[in-house]
Image: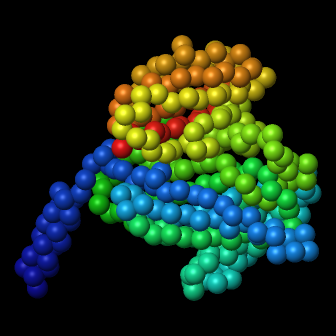
């Protein structure tokens, strides 16, 4: 009996070691979904109702799978009504808002008999889409609100291939360790027409401005310290192989601390290209690599606590990625 148990233990250990030996280095992980296009068609069914129909098209050469599409429907001027904990179920909307400060909307994934959609904890209209390569997904958001520019988010299905990588001793949640990609390194953040808050409706002269990417600790207020106008109105996208530069307009909020501003391109410091003086600036970013990773960050003034340590939640960090095909 003891011999059998010993042999079984050896076999289990050998199998585990073999599995680990076959796993890949997480530093090489690529779950790119930035080639997925997002477009919107606005319909007017009547009675002051607007139907925003979003089409997500994933090309054949997409590497990753887009798990979720979300559209911000938060409104600052709405009163707090308290948290909701309606987790929903397939075919039944969920509502996980913390304060109820979102527009009343309905979310539906079209052509899917089983779906999960509703309001998430960040007051976004969220839908699970599972957009695989060569697929098209359609999400409809209905509201009694006129169009304005809203922030959207595409997140990768990071769990799909998690088992293929050996993460032993690695902290995936470390935002400052740029050597190990995390799920937010492949998130696509952009702006697109959607149901607007009162007073924020778009007009013919309104320009889409991207607030960048909200990292784990960033507040909504922090996210607007740096804002941008950029190609495609999104932070990750593809360009033709011969593209040599990227035009970026940067808006610096009045209370930015210039001494804390930093910009890197593929790890190299390019802060000297920028003038974070509280105004706006047109910057030309050179593109020399196949994957061009741009990262801008800054703190506002008075961002240290009583011990003289920077408050992490006040750090605006905005990554961009331009892939030359």
From the viewer's perspective, tell me whether residue 215 is left or right of residue 95. Answer: left
Q: Is residue 115 above or below residue 305?
A: below
Instruction: Please tell me which residue lies in front, 320 or 145.
Output: 145
Q: Is residue 31 above or below residue 262?
A: below
The structure residue drawn at horizontal position 74% and vertical position 39%, both measured from the top left corner, is 207
The structure residue drawn at horizontal position 36% and vertical position 50%, both measured from the top left corner, is 30
**Percent x, y for residue 6?**
11, 74
- Name which quarter of the figure residue 9 lies in: bottom left
State the quadrant of the N terminus. bottom left
State the quadrant of the C terminus. top left
**Percent x, y for residue 317?**
59, 35
Q: Is residue 135 above or below residue 223?
A: below
The structure residue drawn at horizontal position 49% and vertical position 19%, both measured from the top left corner, is 270
Instruction: Please tell me which residue lies in front, 185 or 177.
Output: 185
- Name which quarter of the figure residue 232 lies in: top right
**Percent x, y for residue 100?**
83, 63
The answer, for residue 169, to whether it is visible in the render is: no
């Amino acid at each position: 009996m003891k011999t059998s148990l010993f042999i079984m233990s050896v076999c289990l250990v050998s199998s585990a070691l073999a599995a680990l030996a076959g796993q890949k280095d997480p530093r090489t992980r690529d779950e790119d979904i930035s080639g997925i296009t997002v477009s919107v068609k606005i319909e007017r069914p009547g009675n002051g109702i607007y139907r925003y129909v979003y089409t997500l098209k994933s090309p054949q050469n997409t590497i990753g799978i887009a798990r979720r599409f979300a559209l911000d429907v938060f409104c600052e001027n709405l009163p707090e009504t308290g948290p909701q904990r309606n987790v929903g179920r397939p075919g039944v909307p969920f509502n996980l808002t913390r304060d109820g400060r979102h527009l009343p909307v309905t979310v539906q994934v079209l052509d899917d008999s089983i779906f999960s959609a509703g309001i998430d904890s960040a007051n976004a209209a969220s839908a699970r889409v599972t957009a695989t390569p060569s697929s098209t997904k359609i999400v409809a958001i209905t509201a009694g609100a006129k169009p304005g520019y809203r922030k959207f988010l595409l997140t990768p299905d990071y769990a799909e291939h998690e088992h293929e990588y050996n993460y032993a001793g690695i902290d995936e949640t470390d935002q400052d360790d740029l050597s190990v990609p995390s799920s937010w390194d492949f998130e696509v953040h952009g702006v697109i027409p959607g149901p607007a808050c009162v007073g924020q409706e778009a007009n013919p002269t309104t320009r889409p401005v991207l607030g960048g990417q909200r990292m784990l600790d960033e507040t909504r207020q922090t996210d607007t310290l740096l804002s941008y106008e950029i190609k495609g109105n999104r932070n990750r996208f593809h360009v033709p192989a011969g593209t040599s530069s990227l035009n970026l307009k940067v808006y610096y909020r009045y209370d930015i601390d210039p001494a804390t501003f930093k910009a890197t391109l593929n790890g190299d410091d390019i802060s000297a290209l920028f003038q974070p003086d509280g105004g706006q600036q047109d910057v030309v970013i050179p593109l020399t690599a196949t994957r061009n990773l741009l990262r801008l960050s800054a703190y506002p003034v008075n961002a240290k606590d009583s011990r003289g340590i920077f408050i992490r939640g006040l750090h605006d960090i905005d990554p961009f990625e331009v892939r030359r095909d």
